Amino acid sequence: MLALVTVFAAFANAAGMVQPVLAAEHAAATRLGLASTDLVFSAGLALALLVVPAAAVVAAAATSRRLAAESLPLRALVGRFTFALIPLGLAMWTAHFLFHALPGIAALPALVRRVAADLGAPLFGAPRWATSAAPAASEWLTAVQLILLDGGLLASAYFAWRIAIHLRGRSRHAVALLAPWTALMAVLWIAGVWIVFQPMQMRGMVH
């Protein structure tokens, strides 16, 4: 269960900072007559971390069990295949953190100059904060994020295939067992790609 929540949290956390989602939360709060988006955000978070993951993996397990005529119970299938989703979740976490790390890296020279000046040794000159901001939406960053998601998808699909082979051997039943989980991975990958191409900002900056 923890692995499942961690995977879906990667996408929910990133999606919660993109402009379309933030705007939708504010619109929902306005329609409900709420003073803030806290309630809407909490409800969405519970949905994204509990309801959606549980429904998604149970549906995938039930479908794969039916298609492959698998005798393992749903809980066993969910437990086995959930771990195959971890590489894709890790890729989303990495892509998201890379977005936030870039501005910090770009500001490092100015920070070093500021610290040196505060210590009474302005050897590097005055900090230039205006020129320290990195373009958060640079093309190379987007390309790296997409490569990470692609790699995560391929790794997850590979591990899921190994699990299917272990259960049913190299047969059409293994393919049938794998298909619904591959579809779930594809949906998560598409969500990750959509997130990468959205304008991202820190929560609370949309009014």
Image (cartoon, rainbow, N blue to C red):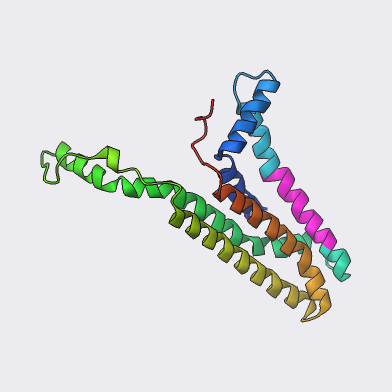
Q: Is residue 183 magenta?
A: no
Single out the residue that lies furthest toward the front: 139
**Residue 31, relative to residue 1: is it above or below?**
above
Magenta stretch, main secondary structure class = helix
Residue 157: x %, y % from top left:
66, 68
Residue 31: x %, y % from top left:
70, 22
The foreground one among 198 and 61 is 198
- Could you tell me which residue is drawn at 10 percent across and 42 percent down? 121
The foreground one among 43 and 202 is 202
**Residue 17, relative to residue 207: is it above or below?**
below
- Could you tell me which residue is drawn at 70 percent across and 55 percent down? 187
Residue 161 visible? The answer is: yes
The foreground one among 17 and 61 is 17
Name which quarter of the figure residue 127 lies in: top left
Residue 132: x %, y % from top left:
30, 43
Residue 160: x %, y % from top left:
69, 69
Quadrant in which the C terminus is drawn = top right
Range shown magenta: 49-63
**Residue 119, relative to residue 8: is it above or below?**
above
- Could you tell me which residue is drawn at 83 percent across and 75 percent down? 173
